[in-house]
Amino acid sequence: MLVLNQVSRYFGGLSAVNKISFEVQSGQIVGLIGPNGAGKTTLINLISGLDRPTHGTVQFIGKPIQHLMPHHINQLGIARTYQNIRLFADMTVIENVIVGMHTQGKASLLNAMLMLPSYWAEEKWLRAEAQKLIDRLGLKEFSRSPAAALSYGAQRRVEIARALATHPRLLLLDEPAAGMNAIETAILGEFILNLRSEGLTVLVIEHDMAFITQVCDQVVVLNFGELIAHGTPDQIKTDPVVVEAYLGAQEGENA
């Protein structure tokens, strides 16, 4: 489904990612891990169109997308969340999710200005669909609350709901469990596994190795912008290069 071939991104003389190649097959959950500054978010930005590779290609369902604008990539079926939450703080939860459904609306500007029955029918449908996503993410009681009033972990779930509102084929998650406790993280993991069972493909950045082990079929490991390992979670956890570069560092930080 997603193929990266020799993807590099340089900022001046600094290499953020260098000659990264891997595939994400349809129906898989693939983890993207590595120390801080390894190039993980840069890679997600290159896939989603927020940035463009200096070299290399990104293909989605056989189509090169590295030169497309973010909204065109989204229309092809790629949605994402962000490491730094990007919700509209003063808008309600349901309004934030509806923003993600803007490409599904058919009512014209004239219909909206005149508030014709077709506009109100569509608005009712959009709200109903948004509410379904909010309920699935366990946010029903916050539906009409301002996004800023929610906890950090709950805001993460609103971002996931908004991304899902675009009906993606590939979902890019940048640290979705940040700010969640162990129980919330486990529940989120089960939710993502359910998404896979429904046919969604997921590429997820996460530092929590228990989460990665719970949900991922394959794991890609970056270090200083280089791909240093690619395999199953069990293979990654016992890879001496990964242990030295990443897992060992994590244990040292937690000591």
Image: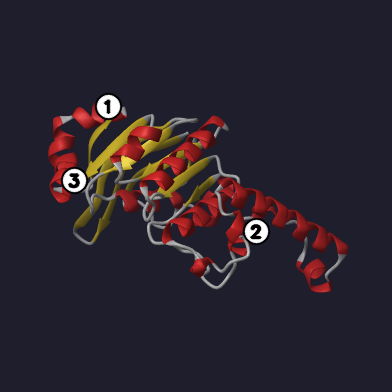
Q: Which residue is mark 1?
A: 234
Q: Is residue 249 left or right of residue 190?
A: left
State which tag comes first along the sequence, 2 or 3: 2
Q: CA distance from mark 1 to mark 3?
A: 17 Å
- Residue 5 in view of the camera: no
Residue closer to the observer: 33 or 184: 184
Give the Cα separation between the discs numbered 2 and 3.
41 Å
What is the residue that sits farthest to the right in this orientation?
A: 117
Question: Amino acid type of disc 2?
Answer: His
Q: Could you say which quadrant of the image residue 139 lies in?
A: bottom right
Question: Which residue is painted at 18% across and 42% down in the image?
Answer: 246
Neighbourhood count class around disc 3 (C-alpha, 10 Å): few under 14, some 14–19, many 20 upward? some
Residue at which label 2 appears: 102
Looking at the image, is 123 positioned above or below residue 60?
below
Q: From the viewer's perspective, is 5 left or right of 99?
A: left
Q: Label 2 neighbourhood size at 10 Å, few (<14), some (14-19), many (20+)?
A: few
Q: Amino acid at mark 1?
A: Asp
